[in-house]
Amino acid sequence: MLRVKKLINIIMFIVLALSVFGYRAVSAQFDSEPEEKIIVTKKRDVTGDGKKERISIVGIPYEQDSAFLREINLVVEVKDGKKVNLPLDAGFDPKLHFADFNGDGLKDVYVTISTGSSGGLINSYAYTFTGGKAKDLSVPPPVSITGQFLDNYKIVMSVPLQKPLVLDVSNRKKDYIKLGMYQKNGKLNEPTEVMVDPYSLFNITKISGKRKGLKGVQRVSGAYHADALTDIYSEWEYRDGNWQLLKTKTKEITKKSMRGL
């Protein structure tokens, strides 16, 4: 009987020890939960009250020491300590910029966030805080670009504000034949369209006088994403409550210039 009691006591001790260990492990897991941190903070008068407001980007990493932020917010301290909190998309390396897009003489807040996807794509946001209230200025949509492969290793592209562009891609025909896109005689096997990326760069640019706009870059690829064909540059101005496309420019990418991409 004594041995049975002793065995029961040993078992109870083991169960208790395991319970304490498990509790500590769970507690440590919660204790290590990533906390919100300030990524960048600056001071500008964005409300028009003559005082500089604190504008910050705060984020919560996916895990401790992770560069990926699973939650990102733009926080602007306006009048009487009031804060305007605007949620943004998750991503990497958010950056904070200022420019007068709408022409009211006050700096608007412009944020860019890397998505981490191939091609270096970004998400971007523009807000005005005149009078202490946030208004989404949105950002320009991607330029509507279309392109189709043609027989004899040609591509015809349509870009707004430009004449139709015909590209000679015969220097890539070996790849295209291996992929089954073309026959050796240059006959296209089936209708194929080019691939158009969203913006990989969207920077503030000077439009006229003190007015600022945005200049974006979109990449156009052929048979696969690394098969880069052209970069399309576009310039935009915020006018009458909307973004207006001012001009576009096409820069062809040769196979030589693709090395190292």
Image (cartoon, grey):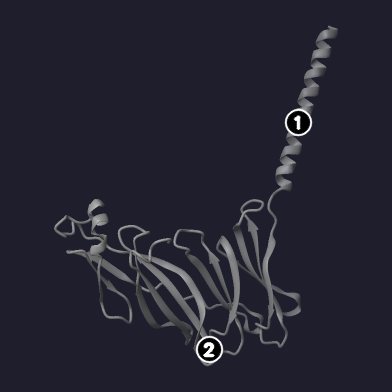
Q: Look at the image and tell me in which quarter the C terminus lies.
A: bottom left
Residue 97 point in image, percent of width and height: 59, 76
First in sequence: mark 1 or mark 2? Answer: 1
- The residue at which mark 2 appears reads as 211
Q: Quadrant of residue 259?
A: bottom left
The disc labelled 1 sits on which kind of residue? Ser
Q: Quadrant of residue 189 in the image?
A: bottom left
Q: Position of residue 212 (x, y in %)?
A: 52, 85
Is disc 1 placed on a helix, strand or loop? helix
Label 1 environment density (alpha carbons within 10 Å; few <14, some 14–19, many ≥20):
few
Q: Horizontal placement of 118 versus 151: left or right?
A: right
Residue on which the image places disc 1: 19
Residue in view at x 35 percent, y 76 percent: 250
Can the viewer see residue 49 in this picture?
yes
Mark 2 surroundings: few (<14), some (14-19) or many (≥20) residues within 10 A: some
State the residue lying farthest toward the bottom: 209
Gap between marks 1 and 2 measured at Cα: 65 Å
Identify residue type, mark 2.
Answer: Arg
The residue that appears at 66% across and 81% down in the rendered structure is: 132
Q: Residue furthest top?
A: 1
- Most extreme residue toward the front is 256
Residue occupying the point 37% across, 80% down: 248
Q: Residue furthest right?
A: 2
Q: Position of residue 36 (x, y in %)?
A: 69, 59
